[in-house]
């Protein structure tokens, strides 16, 4: 069985692309997206996951263009778990900060497969800790600094936007940049730690929720929104990446290997170990997406064939019939009739 690299929910990108464009311009954003293996018209379906290496590549490319070794600080005050959909709603609807941090820890497995959240309570202060599954990548320090934004957004929801932690822990060295880090974060910085963390006073943990919610998001809502969590194997993960790439010409073997940060040959070898090949996975992914589009949209069969990169509608119809035993028109008619 192939070991999966770290992946995170696609919503983790949040407003990062827009912020890169606003700070550095559209051309830098285009180059950064290309370096990360992402399309220019980036969009992800809710509940889909991306390799963490994509985030690293995106921020590393942007940081190089900016010539800034602390470029990740750009995002700290702008990113929030409010961008994480049901995941963020469930956390921010907790009765107090302590409960919110415990909720975040309990559903972390739905956010990323190898990352970890912990709440470590001490005598007078506590530590909200985040450990990334992959730290050796070139753009990691920018990802770590950007991740402080969503982390800070939780206590700030309960304590107000001007809240500052007692200190911030970083799992990399800062050297001469430490002063700039402390100025940017507005607090003392501890470098060379085992993970990134926020140190806060214990009394802050009891801060009540300032908002009254008319709708309660449950843990079950989060599970459903996240599709049950990250794919549990290479094949379903590749299927998901192919579906995400449909419509923007990012579904070739080379494209997916790039997203997985591996060589084409190594990727093919991994699929061989799984007892399959890229063409077979691609066909399955296309047919699953086709079935969804036929049932849930008003796109014509011709439009769906084009979206899925089939040369002609008849080619698409033949491929569809081989999998489902009926034509796309018949499939849609059956499901529309059942819905009524």
Image: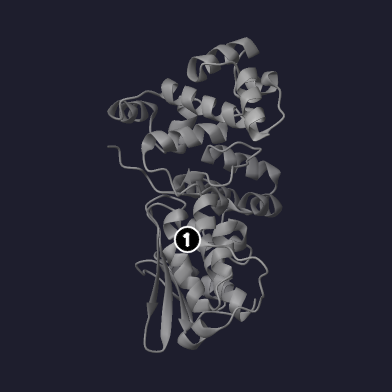
Q: Nearer the viewer, residue 285 or 114?
A: 285
Q: Which of 152 and 222 is in front in this view?
A: 222
Q: What residue is at 51 percent from the left and 20 percent from the top?
A: 324
The quadrant of the rendering that contains the N terminus is: top left
Way the structure is coloured: one colour
Q: Mark 1 points at which residue?
A: 144
Give neighbour class at mark 1: few <14, some 14-19, many 20+ (Cα, 10 Å): many
Residue 128 falls in which quadrant of the image?
Answer: bottom left
**Numbered circles on residues, count:** 1
Q: Would residue 152 be seen by someone viewing this image from the given angle?
A: yes
**Left/right of residue 307 with respect to residue 122 in the rendered view:** right
Q: Nearer the viewer, residue 216 or 97?
A: 216
At numbered mark 1, what does the secondary structure look like: helix, strand or loop? Answer: helix
Q: What residue is at 42 percent from the left and 21 percent from the top?
A: 280
**Location of residue 281 in the rendering, given as x and y in whole percent from the top left corner:** 43, 26
Q: What residue is at 60 percent from the left and 22 percent from the top?
A: 331
Q: Nearer the viewer, residue 79 or 218?
A: 218
**Location of residue 114 in the rendering, given as x and y in whole percent from the top left corner:** 37, 53
Q: What residue is at 60 percent from the left and 80 percent from the top?
A: 159
Position above or below: 208 against 241: below
Position above or below: 327 against 191: above
Q: Would residue 70 be seen by someone viewing this image from the given angle?
A: no
**Location of residue 297 in the rendering, given as x and y in whole percent from the top left corner:** 69, 32
The quadrant of the rendering that contains the C terminus is: top right
Residue 153 falls in which quadrant of the image?
Answer: bottom right
**Location of residue 102 in the rendering, given as x and y in whole percent from the top left corner:** 45, 71
């Amino acid at each position: 069985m192939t070991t999966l690299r770290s992946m995170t929910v696609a919503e983790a990108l949040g407003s990062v692309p827009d912020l890169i464009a606003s700070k550095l311009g559209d051309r830098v954003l285009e180059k950064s997206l290309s370096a990360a293996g992402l399309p220019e018209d980036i969009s992800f379906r809710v509940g889909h996951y991306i390799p963490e290496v994509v985030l690293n590549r995106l921020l590393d490319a942007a940081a190089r263009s900016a010539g800034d070794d602390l470029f990740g600080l750009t995002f700290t005050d702008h990113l929030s778990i409010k961008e994480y959909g049901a995941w963020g709603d469930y956390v921010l609807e907790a009765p107090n900060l302590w409960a919110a941090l415990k909720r975040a820890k309990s559903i972390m497995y739905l956010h990323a497969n190898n990352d970890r959240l912990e709440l470590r309570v001490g005598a007078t202060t506590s530590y909200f800790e985040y450990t990334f599954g992959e730290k050796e990548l070139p753009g990691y320090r920018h990802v770590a600094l950007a991740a402080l934004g969503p982390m800070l957004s939780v206590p700030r929801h309960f304590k107000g936007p001007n809240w500052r932690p007692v200190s911030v822990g970083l799992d990399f060295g800062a050297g001469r940049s430490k002063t700039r880090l402390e100025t940017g974060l507005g607090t003392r910085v501890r470098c060379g730690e085992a993970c990134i963390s926020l140190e806060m006073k214990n009394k802050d943990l009891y801060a009540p929720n300032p908002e009254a919610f008319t709708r309660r998001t449950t843990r079950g809502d989060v599970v459903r929104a996240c599709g049950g969590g990250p794919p549990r194997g290479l094949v379903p993960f590749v299927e998901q990446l192919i579906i995400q790439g449909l419509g923007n010409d990012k579904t070739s073997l080379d494209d997916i290997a790039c997203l997985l940060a591996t060589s084409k040959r190594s990727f093919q070898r991994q699929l061989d170990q799984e007892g399959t090949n890229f063409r077979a996975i691609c066909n399955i992914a296309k047919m699953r997406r086709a079935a969804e589009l036929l049932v849930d949209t008003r796109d014509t069969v011709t439009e769906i064939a084009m979206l899925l990169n089939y040369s002609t509608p008849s080619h698409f119809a033949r491929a569809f019939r081989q999998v489902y035993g009926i034509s796309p028109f018949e499939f849609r008619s059956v499901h529309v009739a059942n819905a009524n």
